[in-house]
Image (spheres, rainbow, N blue to C red):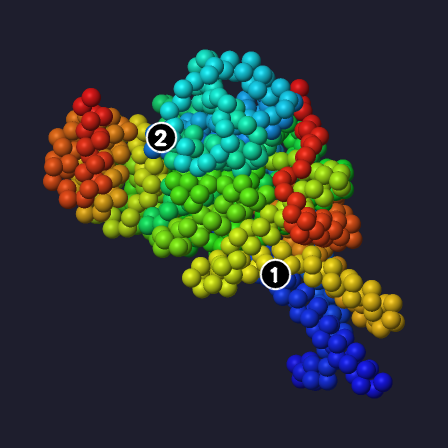
């Protein structure tokens, strides 16, 4: 440091500074180049492994779905156990399981859910909920919701009040899928504003998961949070819940908020037309 | 004589200090922006992996958009381009094609292909434009989203203003009709309008990438390639540097001064209240954003401009120097005009980050950089003539700048690799890496030269765009 100061004081700093910077830039470029090459190679390797794993997984899943082979029988295969020990294989397996579950219904879906529980993948999903990283939590929530693990509801709904918006949305979507309108009561007391994007996601979750029982949606109209009230009105409109007209009419007549009043009146017109 | 020598020595010292100071300032600002961008990009991608864009597709509450596509002599490609605009993944949108007095058969092609008939569309123009000859809609229900406006030639800004006047939806998306859009581009562009609470999103923009030598099928990009032609290949790298390492950071700081004219969405009401596109500048895209921001700040309205780092739009880059020079000199004229129109914002605390950072940054590093470089070259030449140049120091300085330019390109490649990985072929990666080494010697001097032409054109009072011919994309049957 003293040397540098001396150079600066003597007005001789330019050449050492430039030389040092050039070395630094060349070294940094070379290191980045190595990282890029490494990253590309690891991507290629992952893709190859993923293809290999997918072939194995397809066979296993076919046996589980169409031949009623339980997990206890699958794990007798030593090759499978070796693979199952690697985290990347489990990751690919979970993804395949989720994709299949999205495409199947009824007995086939139940078999996949059973496999998810028996294989212990459910435990790693629950572990993900405890992660400090919000994106890992989101992954865990998505997995648990996909396989209809209702026991996870209490933990999941807790994250609907998280600070991270994405986690909040994922948690609410999952909660709606798992317990439908049960999750509504948590929204009524929601203190933070729910922006239009979140509202759209909540409405989307109701539509996507075909929540038939809409009892309780009207409670959203009683919230102190105006964005929750707006969400309630939008839900009533989008799901065409004409049975909720009296609640909307009551809101329209009692609210002092001009925007809410206008929205309520507009929905009344749509639903009673 | 001693006095004279002392004077020269003092001048040399000051000159070296100034050059080094400017270089260090520009390099550190680039690195700082690259750091912010990379960090923000990773956060965005993490967030985006949990986003379900389908909710926008299925909801009536999705923002309603009007796409405005100005077209001038686009007869060769207009049929396919409009078809691709009509088949985007979005529900609440209309397409307004504005034929800006084309001299070719664009209008005939559109009329025949889309079965157009004259219509009496009820609209109240709020921005003054050139005369509209006719407004057409299709008799075919399959093209009910389409409106075609035939107007007298008035330039791109005038055509966009016609679109703003006619648009029936609260948000307008201004695009270049010859751009190739990602099929989910509207979904991604519309989302930010729903996300803010308590402040208005007045504009959103996405990343534009180079499509030369990429394979296009049915108006969609199906294979990404790096061009063989060096000029366009380096532009791939240049766009990566600008969009991935520059604009992302400005987006995060909310100091973005430019939403690319090729593809950007705007809050129609604010765009109109600000006066619409200016026909007095060739940098109408940048000027509109600055004016909209200025309008919001002048009226103390909370707002934001959003930036989406996803590659949403692919465009054709010039492959020969003549067209490249025209494009870049026009960009420089646009920058000068915008900065000149809004010179009151320069270092004006009233305009917050925009006035204190964005505008000075653009002035110093975008507008003045080519001039500073040119002056530096002239002074160096004088030093050589008078035998005053310290060659050791000169080469050291040259390699200092060169090694930084290569490093910055490698950072852009690293960022691309870790995020979108759009160039998976090894050969493409090495082509881009090679471009990083060639760029400072080949491409950079060309950009400086084109910018100097831009200065000259501005001084001479040149107006308009000049003819921009395009080669067209590689198509897959």
Residue B443 in the image: above or below residue B97 = below
Left or right: residue A135 versus residue B257 is left
Residue A150 screen position, x and y as percent: 30, 38
- Which residue: 34% across, 36% down? A200
Between the C-alphas of marks 2 and 1, the distance is 46 Å
- Which residue: 22% across, 41% down? A259
Viewer-side residue, B451 vs A176: B451
Q: What chain letter is assigned to the residue under label 2? A: B
Residue A101 screen position, x and y as percent: 42, 29
Residue A205 screen position, x and y as percent: 33, 34
- Which residue: 34% across, 29% down? B60
Q: Quadrant of residue B475?
A: top right
Residue A8 in the image: above or below residue B30 = below
Q: Which mark is residue B59?
A: 2
Quarter of the N terminus of chain A within the rendering: bottom right
- Which residue: 47% across, 54% down? B254
Q: What chain letter is assigned to the residue under label 1? A: B
Residue B112 in the image: above or below residue A243 = above
What kind of element bears circle 2? loop
* Residue linked to disc 1: B364
Query: How many marks can you see?
Result: 2
What kind of element bears circle 1? helix
Residue B245 screen position, x and y as percent: 59, 52
Comes first in the chain, label 2 or label 1: 2
| Residue A86 in sight here | no
Viewer-side residue, A79 vs B419: B419
């Amino acid at each position: 440091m003293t040397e540098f100061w001396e150079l600066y004081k003597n007005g001789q700093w330019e050449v050492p500074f430039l030389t040092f910077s050039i070395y630094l830039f060349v070294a940094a470029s070379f290191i980045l180049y190595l990282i890029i090459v490494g990253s590309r190679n690891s991507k290629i390797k992952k893709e190859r492994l993923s293809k290999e794993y997918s072939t194995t997984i397809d066979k296993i899943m076919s046996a589980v779905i169409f031949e009623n082979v339980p997990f206890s029988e699958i794990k007798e295969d030593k090759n499978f156990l070796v693979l199952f020990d690697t985290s990347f294989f489990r990751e690919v397996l979970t993804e395949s399981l989720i994709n299949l579950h999205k495409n199947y219904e009824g007995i086939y879906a139940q078999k996949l859910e059973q496999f998810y529980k028996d294989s212990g993948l459910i435990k790693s999903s629950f572990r993900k909920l405890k992660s400090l990283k919000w994106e890992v939590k989101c992954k865990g929530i998505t997995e648990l919701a996909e396989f209809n693990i209702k026991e996870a509801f209490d933990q999941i709904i807790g994250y609907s009040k998280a600070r991270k918006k994405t986690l909040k949305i994922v948690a609410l979507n999952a909660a709606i899928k798992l317990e439908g309108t049960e999750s509504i009561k948590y929204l009524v007391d929601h203190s933070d504003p729910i922006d239009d994007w979140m509202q759209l996601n909540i409405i989307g979750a109701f539509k996507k998961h075909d929540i038939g029982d809409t009892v309780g949606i009207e409670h959203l109209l009683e919230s102190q949070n105006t964005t929750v009230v707006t969400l309630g009105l939008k839900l009533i409109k989008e799901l065409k819940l004409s049975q909720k007209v009296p609640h909307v009419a009551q809101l329209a007549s009692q609210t002092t908020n001009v925007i809410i009043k206008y929205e309520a009146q507009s929905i009344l017109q749509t639903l009673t037309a | 004589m001693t006095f004279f020598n002392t004077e020269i020595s003092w001048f040399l010292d000051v000159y070296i200090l100034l050059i080094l100071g400017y270089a260090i300032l520009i390099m550190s600002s680039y690195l700082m922006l690259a750091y912010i961008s990379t960090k923000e990009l990773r956060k965005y991608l993490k967030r985006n992996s949990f986003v379900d864009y389908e909710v926008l597709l299925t909801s009536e509450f999705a923002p309603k958009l009007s796409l405005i596509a100005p077209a001038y002599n686009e007869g060769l490609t207009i049929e396919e381009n409009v078809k691709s605009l009509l088949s985007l993944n979005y529900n609440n949108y209309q397409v307004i094609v504005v034929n800006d007095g084309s001299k070719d058969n664009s209008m005939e092609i559109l009329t025949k292909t889309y079965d157009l008939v004259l219509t009496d569309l009820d609209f109240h123009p709020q921005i003054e434009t050139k005369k509209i000859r006719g407004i057409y809609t299709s008799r075919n229900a399959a093209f009910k989203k389409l409106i075609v406006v035939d107007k007298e030639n008035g330039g791109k800004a005038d055509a966009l203003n016609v679109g703003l006047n006619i648009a029936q939806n609260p948000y307008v998306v201004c695009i270049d009709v010859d751009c190739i859009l990602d099929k989910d581009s509207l979904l991604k562009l519309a989302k930010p309008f729903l996300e803010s609470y308590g402040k208005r999103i007045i504009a959103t923009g996405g990343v534009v990438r180079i499509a030369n030598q990429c394979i296009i099928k049915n108006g969609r990009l199906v294979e990404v390639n790096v061009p063989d032609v060096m000029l366009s290949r380096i532009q791939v790298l240049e766009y990566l540097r600008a969009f991935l390492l520059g604009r992302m950071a400005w987006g995060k700081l909310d100091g973005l001064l430019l939403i690319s004219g090729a593809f950007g969405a705007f809050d129609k009401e604010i765009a109109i209240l600000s006066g619409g596109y200016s026909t007095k500048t060739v940098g109408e895209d940048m000027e509109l954003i600055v004016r909209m921001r200025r309008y919001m700040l002048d009226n103390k309205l909370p707002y934001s401009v959003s930036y989406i780092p996803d590659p949403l739009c692919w465009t054709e880059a010039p492959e020969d120097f003549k067209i490249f020079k025209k494009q870049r000199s026009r960009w420089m004229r646009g920058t000068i005009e915008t900065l000149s129109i809004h010179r009151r914002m320069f270092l004006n605390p009233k305009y917050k980050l925009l006035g204190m950072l964005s505008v000075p940054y653009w002035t110093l590093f975008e507008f003045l950089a080519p001039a500073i470089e040119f002056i530096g070259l002239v002074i160096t030449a004088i030093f050589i003539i008078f035998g005053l140049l310290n060659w050791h120091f000169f080469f050291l300085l040259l390699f200092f700048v060169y090694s930084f330019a290569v490093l910055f390109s490698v950072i852009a490649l690293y960022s691309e690799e870790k995020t979108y990985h759009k160039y998976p072929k090894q050969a493409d990666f090495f082509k881009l890496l090679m471009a990083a080494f060639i760029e400072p010697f080949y491409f950079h001097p060309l950009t400086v030269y084109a910018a100097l032409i831009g200065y000259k054109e501005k001084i001479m009072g040149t107006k308009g765009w000049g003819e921009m011919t395009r080669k067209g994309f590689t198509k897959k049957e």
